[in-house]
Amino acid sequence: MERKKSWLRKDFDALRVQWDMLTFYERFEQLVTHVLSVAISIIILVSLWQLIRAVISLLVSAVVNVVVASLQANCFSSSGCMRSGLSQTSSFNSQLRVDRDQRRGLRCLASA
């Protein structure tokens, strides 16, 4: 039973057979082509590895943020004094947000 050769192996076998018939410049071209192909492949693999690491770190940080938020919600909702302080702070923050949005709207109207 004959094993199937990969396309890369077939290309190298064909190059080896034709190597003696190639001129110096054609040999140089072949070498440069193969070196560049390997270099580009390495760059793609490194970039893919960095992308995978970045995506995994973002996923992990998102999970951690959800866990921390749920823990904070459980801690603050269980004590009464923290709850009243939190509600005062959130109403103050919402008032600041409204003021900021109104100023931004006025700036947009003034620039138009």
Image (tube, rainbow, N blue to C red):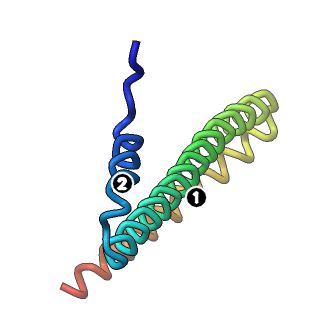
Q: Position of residue 70 (x, y in %)?
A: 68, 32
Q: Nearer the viewer, mark 2 or mark 1?
A: 2
Q: Quadrant of the C terminus?
A: bottom left
Which image quarter: residue 108? bottom left
Which sits in the foreground, 94 or 37?
Answer: 37
Which residue is depicted at the point 58% across and 40% down?
A: 59
The amino acid marked with disc number 2 is Leu
Q: Within 10 angstroms of label 2, few (less than 14), some, or many (20 or more) residues?
A: some
Which image quarter: residue 83? top right
Which residue is depicted at the point 24% across and 87% down?
A: 111
Left or right position of 62 against 67: left
Left or right position of 28 against 91: left
Q: Is residue 49 above or below residue 74?
A: below
The amino acid marked with disc number 1 is Asn
Which sits in the foreground, 6 or 43?
Answer: 6
Q: Is residue 80 above or below residue 24?
A: above
Which residue is depicted at the point 36% across and 54% down?
A: 15
Pick whichever of labels 2 and 1 is earlier in the sequence. Answer: 2
Callout 2: SS? helix
* Residue that mark 2 sits on: 15
Left or right position of 106 against 61: left
Q: Within 10 angstroms of label 1, few (less than 14), some, or many (20 or more) residues?
A: few
| Label of residue 93 in the image | 1
Which image quarter: residue 67? top right
Callout 1: SS? helix
Left or right position of 103 against 68: left
Extreme residue toward the top, this view: 1
